[in-house]
Image: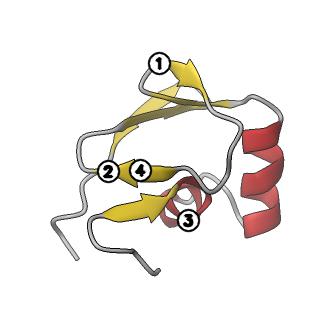
Amino acid sequence: MTTSGNTIKLDQFLKLLGVAETGGHAKLMIQGGEVKVNGTIETRRGRQLVEGDRVMVEGQTFSVNLGDS
């Protein structure tokens, strides 16, 4: 996983969580409107997430925590 400073791309985050098996799968989920960031549907797979952002997918909510790397 590559992060840029204190951010991570949305598609990379979904792969890291194991919600998406591949980058292509993540892309389809995001473009299909299945992913919300901070309560808003996000359709940009390159959306940069920052510490504290909340990602909701498949009925689960995940908080972005980049401090463990």
At which x and y percent is residue 4? 38, 74
- Badge 1 local density, few (<14 within 10 Å), some, or many (20+)? few
Amino acid on which the number 2 mark rests in the picture = Val
Query: Which comes sooner in the sequence, label 1 or label 4?
Result: 1
Query: Which comes sooner in the sequence, label 1 or label 2?
Result: 1
Q: What separation in Å lies between label 4 and label 2 (alpha carbons)?
A: 4 Å
Q: Which scheme is used to colour this image of the protein?
A: secondary structure
| For residue 12, above or below residue 40 | below
Are dots 3 and 2 in contact, CB under 8 Å? no
Residue ID for mark 3: 12
Residue ID for mark 1: 39
Say which residue appears at 80% left-offset and 40% top-offset: 31
At which x and y percent is residue 68? 18, 70
Are dots 4 and 2 in contact, CB under 8 Å? yes
Residue ID for mark 2: 50
Say which residue appears at 39% left-offset and 75% top-offset: 3
Q: State the SS at label 4.
A: strand
Is residue 33 toward the left or the right of residue 52 in the image?
right
Say which residue appears at 56% left-offset and 55% top-offset: 14
What is the residue that sits farthest to the bottom in this orientation? 2
Amino acid on which the number 4 mark rests in the picture = Leu
Q: State the SS at label 2.
A: strand
Q: What separation in Å lies between label 1 and label 2 (alpha carbons)?
A: 15 Å
- Numbered mark located on residue 26 in the image: none
Amino acid on which the number 1 mark rests in the picture = Gly
Q: What separation in Å lies between label 1 and label 3 (alpha carbons)?
A: 19 Å
